[in-house]
Image: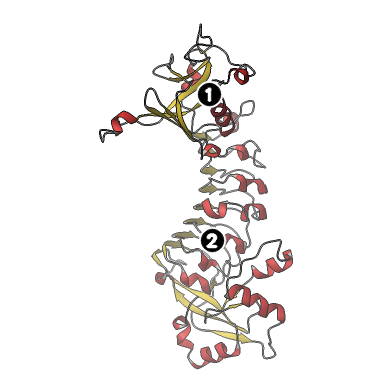
Amino acid sequence: MRLSCDVEMLSRGLASYGMRAKTKPIRSSISIGRRPGASSSKEGLIFLLVCTAKDRNGTKFKLKGNVEQIFGKFVQNGKATIRLKEPAKDICISKADPLQLKNILSVIKLGHLDRNCDLEKIHLTTLNPAKTSQVERLPTKMVVHSRKDYPVTTNFPKTLESLQIMHCKLKKVDSRILELRNLKCLDLSNNNLAKLPDSVGRLNQLAELKLANNQLDRIPLGLLNSSLKHSLQALDLSGNQFKMLPSQLTEFANLVHLKVNDNQLLCLPWNMGQLTRLKFFWAGNNKLQFLPYSFTRLALEEVDMFGNGFQGSGMFPSTQDEGYFPSFVEIAARAVKKYRLMYTERDLPQILIQYLGLAKWCLCGKPCFQPYAQHCSQFSLHRVAHTVAGLDSAGSTTAPVQGFLCSKDCWQRLQSNPNAVWKCSRR
């Protein structure tokens, strides 16, 4: 029984003198087996062997009555600590396969209790030195820039944290990639991807997702509703065929970098202001005619919107529906958003969940779905970003911002003082 993992040996004797050895985890092989010539003696039947690249013969530790405690709270994360009585050491295990780690810990407990009847049911071999492949550190980064280098007959290393596959003409995401649960950066740019599978959302440690220069036109709902909402920090969708971005994208609370340039975007999500941690935004060479009012709530370091079809300067005429009166659905939906009521797919039909996702925000800070009126005013991008790329060849940095009004009162306030657009209270 053998386990490849990272091991850090800590001596508790030094801690009693207020000292700590300068150690760090190293790739090791932990095995449990019978020592040559061992029998039912005072030392017990089985032993623990820890081998490293520098010491492939390893260090043996007896298990019978020698385990003070096993810390296994984070076994599912591939982490555990075995505290030995003699010598007074802590064997700190990390980056291990959770299932194998759980099995080996159960055998260690049996060896500590000297349960011979149970140990004999387990196939344990004689302890042998580790092979080089068992103690060498597995790769965490892989780069593939041509089809001839793409692994067809071999699997991707399970330890990969960064994977870049470019210029390989991929038409779909390899299912083997979706099993790499340690991935933090996935770059599939410059391929022929036309669709993403929902299962991309299973990569729950993913912080960077780069999909530039493909043929994508939508983001699957499974990805939008996955744990990536909490882990993703950088998203690159440039050079694709998107005409609009889903409103659920604004729920990615930790998003810092967002690239959507060189698409066919007609508008941005109305609730884009929810991306409070967004610092870098690129949306050049699209078909945007205006920005949503919530865009004014962002605090960016850099913004680039060169090459869009923004309308001219000046105050645009507002539109108004004289016979407007909110429906019961509208009133209920406003209340859900205003009081931030929690709901799931079990609580509401899918059509109502989609309706709630179309919320727009009035200048007074209240939500609305079927606005009483709308208006468009010019806004300087320097108010939301330190570095602003010119919107056209003339270097203009002023873009039209479209806002909505939830009621006749807000309409009249805007009519009486058109210059007070940016002085209204914000959500």
**Residue 245 visible in image:** no
Camera-side residue: 220 or 147?
A: 220
Residue depicted at x 54% and y 35%? 145
Mark 1 is surrounded, within 10 Å at the Cα level, by few (under 14), some (14 to 19) or many (20 or more) other residues, namely some
Query: Which residue type does callout 2 highlight?
Result: Asn
Q: Is residue 142 visible?
A: yes
SS class, disc 1: helix
Residue occupying the point 49% across, 30% down? 139
Mark 1 or mark 2, which is nearer the start of the sequence? 1
Residue 164 in the image: state x and y as whole percent: 53, 39
32 shown above or below 202: above
Position of residue 53 measured from the top left corner of the image (x, y, whole percent): 42, 20
Residue 308 percent coordinates (x, y):
53, 66
The residues bearing labels 2 and 1 have C-alpha atoms spaced at a distance of 69 Å
Image quarter where the N terminus lies is top right
Which residue corresponds to the image point at 52% horizontal and 88% vertical from the top-left? 414
Whether residues under marks 2 and 1 lie with C-beta atoms below 8 angstroms apart, the answer is no
Vertical relation: 204 (above or below) 25: below
Q: Which residue is mark 2?
A: 285
Give residue 114's position: percent from left, percent from top: 54, 20
| Helix, strand or loop for disc 2 | loop
Q: Nearer the viewer, residue 273 or 47?
A: 47
Using the image as rendered, state which of residue 78 and residue 298 is in the foreground.
78
